[in-house]
Amino acid sequence: MKKWLIFIICLVVLVISSSMTYEQQSILPELEDLLANKPLEKQLSILKIPYWGTIVSVEERGYFPFVEFLIRKLTHFMGFGCIALGLYFAWGKRRFAAGIAIGGTATIAVLDEFRQSFTPGRTMSAQDVLVDTAGAIVFVSLVVAVRKILKNKRQKAQL
């Protein structure tokens, strides 16, 4: 049970956050205070991100809503990466642990987007599922790569 704890905590955080309306999750007032001088505005103005059939940019949305959009998508990426790691470590050293973690996380992402569609002001997004799954792939792949590197070093040290 102990090894499932991180996974369960991540799921609880996910359920709570995806049950909140957009307004409840908005960090625009905090961003306006924290980033009043609009750092990196010129660099961020270069970015034009296709999303839900529109282009999300500083020009289109404004500086603070664009920064909030980036933070929200980064949160998706990192949050689902952590869910995947929780599942990967909980699964243990069994065969196909990485595949189970990534596939399981993608399934959770789909189910979460569906469930989220019942929350006022929120919608389902296949693009969010892709961001979530990408986070799972990157996080699990990094851990698998590090484990292989460390295993190879230990084997060479024994020779």
Image (cartoon, rainbow, N blue to C red):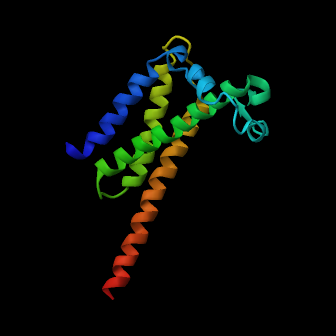
Looking at the figure, which quarter contains the C terminus?
A: bottom left
**Horizontal and vertical percent for residue 36?**
66, 27
Please say if 38 is above or below 32: below
Please say if 26 is above or below 145: above
Please give the name of the residue rendered at 52% of the width and 35% of the height, measured from the top-left corner: 75
Left or right of residue 8, residue 147 in this image: right
Please give the name of the residue rendered at 30% of the width and 58% of the height, measured from the top-left corner: 93
Q: How many marks?
A: 0
Please give the name of the residue rendered at 46% of the width and 27% of the height, measured from the top-left corner: 112
Q: Between 132 and 110, which is closer to the camera in this rendering?
A: 132
Q: Between 103 and 127, which is closer to the camera in this rendering?
A: 127
**Horizontal and vertical percent for residue 43?**
76, 42
Which quadrant of the structure image shows residue 59? top right
Q: Between 53 and 10, which is closer to the camera in this rendering?
A: 10
**Horizontal and vertical percent for residue 151?**
36, 72
Please give the name of the residue rendered at 44% of the width and 53% of the height, measured from the top-left corner: 140
Q: Between 95 and 139, which is closer to the camera in this rendering?
A: 139
Left or right of residue 76, residue 1 in this image: left
Left or right of residue 22, residue 19 in this image: left
Which quadrant of the structure image shows residue 122? top right
